[in-house]
Amino acid sequence: MRLRQRLLQFSALAVVVIAIFGWSGCMRQALAPPAGVTPSPALPVPQAPASTDDGLVTVVLPAPPPPPPRWAPPAFPETAKPLAAPSGVKVVLLLGADDRPGAPGRSDSMLLAAVDTNNNTVRLVSLPRDAWAYIPGQGWDKWNSAYAYGHEALAKKTVERMLGIRVDYTAVLGFQGFAHIVDALDGVDVVVDHDLNYDDPWDKPPLHIHIKAGPQHLGGEQAVQFARFRADSQNDWGRIKRQQQLARAMLKQALRPQTLTRLPALITALASAYRTDIPMTERLKFALLLNRLKSEAIPSDTIPGTDRMVPMVLSDGTRADVWYTFLDLEAARQKAAWLVLGQPQGPAAFRDEAHRLSSVYRQAEPPRP
C-alpha cells in the first residue's frame, strides 16, 4: 500500500515538474523562417545630375542591383557518439506545449531532467525556447518550433542533435492540465519579487496577468500566469527563474503529508493532464526515489545564450524582426554533460567535439544587418 501511495505521489510530482516549466508564451511573436532566408537588399541611390552641351540635365539612375544571394546556413552534424547516462540515471525531456484547436502548438517551455537513483537526486536544466537550433528535416529555426513540426519525437531529436546527449523519455503537459494539478494540490506558496502586470486582449483566450509583490498563495490559474510572465527587463531568463522557484514550491507542497488526502483529486487531474512514454517499471523506480528525495537534492541550471533581434525576410517575402537566443554551444554542452553525468564536464572527446561544432554553429547564425 505504501508503494502505491508513493507511486501516486511521484506521478503528481512528475507532472508538477513538467507543469512548472510548461508555460511561457505570454506574448505572441513572429515565427522564425525556415532554412534559407533572403537578407533585405539595399535601395538604389540616384547618382548626381550630369550636364550636357545643350544645357539639358540628365539624371542617370543605376541599373537595379542583382538579386541578393540566398543565405543558406550549413546543416548541423549529428554527434558521432551521443553522451548517454550511466546505469541508474534516466534523462527525460519535459515539454509544456501550447496546443490549441486548429493551430499547431509549440513547446513554449522545455526542460531536461536527469533522475539519478544512484545518488538520490534529480538534476534539472532549462532550455531557452527561442534558441537558434537545427531541427532535423526542417533546417534552422527556433528551438520550440521542433514540437510544431513533429511533436515530442522531433523535439527530442533536436535536443539530442544540439546538445550531443541521449534523451531516454519525453513527457508533455498542456495549459489546463497544469492549472488543474495546482488546484488539486490546494495551491502553492511563493514570494513574488515585484508586481507582475501584463495584458494581451488579442490572445485566445485573452491573457491578463496581475500578481502583487510579496508572499502569495497561488491557485491554478494564477500559477499559470506566474509561470508564463516575461514582460519585464529579464524577459525569458526571468521567467525561467520564476519557473524554477515555482517548481520547488510545488515540490514542497506535493511532499506534505496532507497531500495524501488529496490523492483522488490528483488522480483525476492527472488522468488527462499529460502524456509520456516513461514505462511503468521506471515510474516505480522513480517512486522509490521519492522516499529519499529532498528539495535541496534538485539542483538546477540553465543553458546559456545571448538574445538579439534579427531582421528577416521570410519565405513569403514579408519582413519581420524576430527575437532569437544564440547559444554558447561549448557552455551549453558542458551543462548537458553535468546533467547526464553529474560531473562538471564531460569526457575529453565530448569537449573536443563541442569546441569543433561551436564554429559550425556560429557560421549558421543569421547575418547581422
Image (tube, rainbow, N blue to C red):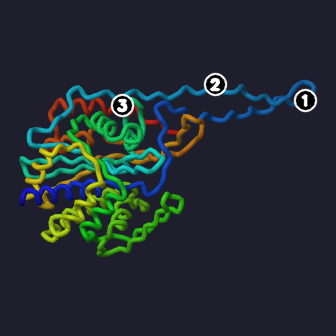
Dot label at residue 66:
2
Helix or strand or loop: what does disc 1 sit on?
loop
Q: Looking at this view, is 147 or 341 the one in front?
A: 147
x and y percentages locating residue 205 in the rendered image: 48, 60
In the displayed structure, 41 sits above or below 183; it is above
x and y percentages locating residue 172 in the rendered image: 30, 48
Instruction: Please report contact status of discs 2 and 3: CB closer than 8 Å, yes or no.
Output: no
Residue at which label 3 appears? 136
Amino acid of disc 3: Pro
In the displayed structure, 273 sits above or below 134; it is below
Instruction: Please report contact status of discs 1 and 2: CB closer than 8 Å, yes or no.
Output: no
Helix or strand or loop: what does disc 3 sit on?
loop
Q: Earlier in the sequence, mark 1 or mark 3?
A: 1
In which quadrant is the N terminus drawn?
Answer: bottom left
x and y percentages locating residue 249 in the rendered image: 23, 65
Q: Earlier in the sequence, mark 2 or mark 3?
A: 2
For the residues carrying marks 1 and 3, which lies nearer the camera in this image? Answer: 3
Q: Earlier in the sequence, mark 1 or mark 2?
A: 1
In the displayed structure, 81 sits above or below 211; it is above
x and y percentages locating residue 208 in the rendered image: 46, 66
Check the image and name the residue furthest to the right: 54
Q: Looking at this view, is 224 or 79 the one in front?
A: 224
Q: Looking at this view, is 33 or 356 the one in front?
A: 33
In the displayed structure, 161 sits above or below 251; it is above
Amino acid of disc 1: Leu
Q: Seen in the image, is 53 located left or right of residue 330?
A: right
Task: Please tell me which residue is depicted at 27% across the width and 53% down the height of the picture.
Answer: 18
Task: Please tell me which residue is depicted at 18% across the width and 29% down the height of the picture.
Answer: 349
Residue at which label 1 appears? 56
